[in-house]
Amino acid sequence: GRPIFFSVIIILLSFIPVFALTGQEGKTFHPLAFTKSFAMIGVAIFSITLVPALIPSFIKGRLRREEDSWLVRNFINIYKPWLTWLMPRWNLAMWAFSALLVLGAGLFPINAIVPIPWHWCFLVVTGVTMAITVMFTRGARWQVLSFVTLAALSLWAYHFPKIGVDYMPPLDEGSILDMPVTVPRASVTQAADDLKARDALLRRFPEVELIVGKAGRADTPTDPSPLDMVESIITLRPKEHWPKRKLEYKDAEKQTAVVLAALQERHLIDPIEDESERRALLDPATMNAVMRLDETMREMVLQRFHDFETDLGPKLVRESVVELVGRWQKADRLLAPLSEADIDHLAAGLQNQFAPILSAGPGQEDVNRLIQEIAEQLAGERKVELNPALLTARFHPLYAAYLAVANVLGSEQPTLFTQMLGFIEQQRDKHWREQGRQLDYDIFPRTVAAYDRYAIEELHKLADEKGVWAEKTDDAAEQQQLVALRAELDAAWSPHLFLWKKSKDDLLKEVDSVVRMPVWANIWTQPIINRIDMLATGVRTMIGVKVFGKDLDQIQEVSEQVAEVLRQIPGAVDVFPDQSRGKGYLEIKIDRDRAARYGVKVADIQDVIETALGGKVITMTVEGRERFPVRVRYNRSSRADEEEVQNLLVSAAGTPMEPAAGAAGRGMIESGKGAGNAATTGSNSGPVQIPLALVASVQIVEGPAMIKSENGMLRNYVQLNVRDRDVVGFVEEAQRVVAQQVKLPQGMYLAWSGQFENQVRAGKTMLVVFPAVILVIFVILYLTYNDLIDAFLMMKAVPEAMAGGIFLLWLFDYHFSVAVQVGFIACFGMATETGIIMLVYLRAAVEQRGGLAKIQSLAELRDAVIEGAVHRLRPKLLTEGVAIIALAPMLWASGVGHEVISAMAAPVLGGLLIADEVVDIFIPVRFYWVRRYRWLKMHGIDEATAGYDQAVRS
């Protein structure tokens, strides 16, 4: 009871680091830790109270031995000889343990836990491991061999590709947020037009279902978004509905090479011996052919989708009518039966109103209106009686009883309306799936034919440019030859080609290459994570580089330099420095001398400018208890640009005193220029209306788009996302490269912000809490066994479990994140628990033979250890099998949030698989050699002279 109880306590303690997490990661994983803790507390209580009391009641008669089960018996037949062979080979067991750690250290980003450069961390881990292994290896020859082999293994592991480091596994939200940035001086009209053009391009992708875009800020003072900040939320179709239109680039490249060889065989292209010239022909031809194929497939699939949705709506309307009438017929609600003609007539009358809605995906209110419309039409034809019972769902008595219980427990009661919504969604999804299968079948031959044609055309074009295309003799014969070649290529390629659905990353790359507009910079993210990032870090992308300084021009220049350096680093996408300058400002400078010549007061000019451009309150209107100001100003067309502002009219006292100026002024006035084409009074001595340009200079000057500051310093952002690599590793490389290549002026500095800050914070928390928890677990193990060496034996399961988790992370290409850390924490507790149970069986086997004092030989000690290990095999198979069955579905999970679940399950499953095998093999071997040393010392036998089956001397 005590070992089981303490093993549960150890699992509870292992979750203390999860409770120590703060911020976003704390809110994410605290519920998991609480659930696990409460479950283990219940297990601990029942294991020492209820279970012992129930054993006599449920377990009676003869107990089956382990060997009675064919599964356990087969495992024993494999395990026992292997353990017997390994028992005397202490050196091999030590070396295998060290090799696992070295290989794991080569893959694992140790610097994500310890704030030390990775190569120093790796050197320390491998150095300590090799030192301990050599120290405890028996025999000088084996010590040298262990050192040499582990050193070679370390050199090999040093060059392993490292597991990446992220804060959290990126979640697929099922949508994309397009946040492009344009020039600060963009007008409202220009921004709206460009936004419409972008959204039109995005709608040409068959994977896109809906787009909603906006420019500028919402009508609230809490939204500081400038006009050049554009957002478009792109809702994607369910991935089950995505067509298989992706041609792998390596397959396309291979087929292009086949096409080139076929053209050369037919002497249409001259032989190319130089490999570099051949690649210069193949690579651009493949890229252009793939781009043309993508465009063709997009248009074809989109047209098929449009035709399908046109036919889907009427079909869903008729199926809804049939389903609803069938339900009423079963419930005896129909006053007269409906024929097929009646159903067709009823469905036809509803199609115009409901077919587009059902095809696009109805809401509950749409289904409610459909049901009510059907009921009203049938009631008008005296087919049903319109009463509340007609719209009430009717259930089987047993199912109704189940629903009543579920309702008491808090479940929502189904209604006729919700059931019909579920039916329509099910039918809609069914038709989409059928259409997807048919579409994949139809586009395959077209893809093959289209790519071969595009490859031939691109190779023809490039070969013509390079002068290696054969001279034309007969165009008709050449075209006929190319048509025959395409048919031959299509037939040869079709059996070996596979098309795939595009992943979200593939779709983003394709969208980014298509949606490119002048003076626009693309930034692609997701709606939820974007809001989280902006609230947490102030940056709308994964990473932001803050450039601090005292001069806006210097800040903008340094931002451009940083952005240029970041674009060269692998993995950097959507790199864009915020434009702190470039905003157009209307500057009006009053010429006091010219104003005086025209007899215009400066205050009058300022009053005209204020009223015409900004507006001026002239009165108040009273409506009941409310008062509203009335503001007047010129309409938009009269103040649209600087030319219109120059023509604003200002009242002058008379003609100017200076002849030259007066002639110019009269010329402008007499020509009728000015907003509103005002005329003079008819007398040169009376008041006149003159254009503003005569008394002021009006021009557009460049100024700051937005002045941003932080901690008293001016600030600008360089924003970017990271794709196809880990974020933390990218930041480390980027910080190093930027520090080397960007020379900052005096008084300026950079600060890095983004998701990786959360990972750094969580890493610092783990660095303090986790070693403390390991120490507490060690103390508990010591208190459990009252044996320091046995406690060390148990703790060795932790690094072995970590090595197993690392291997599975590498195998499934998961990055090291907070979710993975939580998985490792759970794995360490379970691995320690497994080791405790093994040690219980080993110690019990020795105690059953009277302890070390009564064991007469090393052979008897070895047999006792093997017996204890074998006896533990059945509970081990049960626990490991249950864990694998529970974790495997998590590893291959799909749906919303599966990225976090899979990342957590990978280290647990990998650690259990490796740690369990290590516990089954290494712990018995270590336990035997520790007890062997104590037995020899107890009986006064020299270690150097002791034989393999040494017995007690008489």
Image: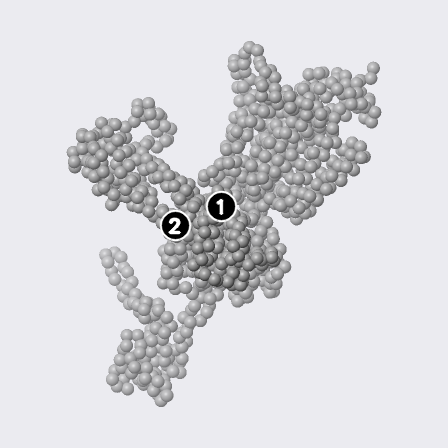
Quadrant where the image shows the N terminus: top right
Farthest residue toward the top? Answer: 61
Q: Residues within 10 Å of mark 2 (few under 14, many from 20)?
A: some
Kind of residue indicated by mark 1: Ala
Give residue 300's mark.
2
Q: How far apart, in angstroms, are the residues tagged by discs 1 and 2?
A: 24 Å
Sequence-wise first label, 1 or 2: 2
Q: In the visual, does 62 lie left or right of 188?
A: right
Identify the residue at horizontal 54%, vertical 19% (top origin).
51
Quarter of image, res 102: top right
Would you say residue 348 is visible in this rendering?
yes
Res. 365 visible in picture: no
Q: CB under 8 Å between callouts 1 and 2? A: no
Q: Position of residue 562 (x, y in %)?
A: 56, 60
- Residue 236 lies left or right of residue 755; in this view the side is left
* Quadrant of the rendered image containing residue 83: top right
Which of the image's four quarters has the C terminus?
top right
Give whichever of 74, 14 is nearer the camera. Answer: 74
In the picture of the structure, the residue carrying the numbered disc 1 is 492
Label 1 element class: helix
Mark 2 is on which residue type? Met
Give percent across and percent down for residue 72: 60, 21
Percent position of residue 492, x then y: 49, 45
Query: In the image, 928: left or right of 630?
Result: right
- Which circle, 1 or 2, is nearer the viewer? 1
Compared with 839, 214 (above or below) is below
Q: Nearer the viewer, residue 927 or 323?
A: 323
